[in-house]
Amino acid sequence: MKKITVKKGTILQRKGDTNSKVYLVESGLLRSYTIDEKGKEHIYMFGPENWLVTDNCKPETPCQLFIDAIEDSILNVASKEEMVKETPDFNALFRRLNSMQNRIVMLMSSSAKERYEHFVETYPNIIPRVPLKMVASYLGITPEALSRVRNELSKNK
């Protein structure tokens, strides 16, 4: 793995790129997302410290996701082939797979309130680090709906 430092706003991968990399976040924060035909962003995942961020495509296949840095970040970067050859951080891999499975189940079957509570549980330190519109995008709801959920939860405390 090669260690790199990137500035906030750096785009590490664009939709359609081939030979996508695997990013293990040492410090900072990444996100992966897609942009639909109307230009709306849909956040797939956040990558805080000790998380793996990658596009799950074969090296020769165009990737589906953009990956960028939300904060200045220090990353360990490898090709997918290198990652398989080296001893991977299986904890980071399993954490990512578990998070993605839970996210899919939540999107299919949970209310906005439940999704937000799960988000806070999964990413306890992300809320103060990203704009709320990114959180809403991740949850698949509007910023207004997120505001209502947050107000409801604050009243119930």
Image (cartoon, rainbow, N blue to C red):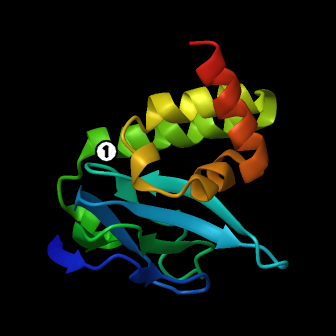
State the image coordinates of residue 143 (x, y, percent, origin top left).
72, 51
- Closer-to-camera residue (87/14): 14
Q: What's the residue at 16%, 75% (across, down)?
A: 2
- Residue 98 against residue 29 in the figure, above or below: above
Q: Residue at 58% of width from left, 27% of height from top?
A: 117
The kind of residue tagged 1 is Ala
Q: Position of residue 20 (x, y in %)?
A: 44, 78
Image x and y of residue 61, in percent: 58, 80
- Identify the residue at horizontal 53%, vertical 58% (top origin): 131
Answer whether residue 141 is visible to the viewer in this image. Answer: no
Corner quadrant of residue 39: bottom right
Q: Is residue 110 left or right of residue 71?
A: right
Q: Is residue 14 left or right of residue 140?
A: left
Residue sitting nearer the eye, 12 or 133: 133
Q: On the rendered image, what quadrant is the N terminus found in?
A: bottom left
Establish if 50 lies above or below 150: below
The quadrant in which the C terminus is found is top right
Question: Circle 1 — which element?
Answer: helix
Q: Which residue is mark 1?
A: 92
Q: Residue at x 41, y 67 (%)?
A: 70
* Front residue (pair 151, 94): 151
**Residue 93 x, y percent position in the rendering:** 36, 46
The residue sitting at the top extreme is 157
Query: Is 4 placed left or right of 36 in the picture?
Result: left
| Residue farthest toward the right in the current orientation of the protein | 38
With respect to residue 38, does 123 lie above or below? above
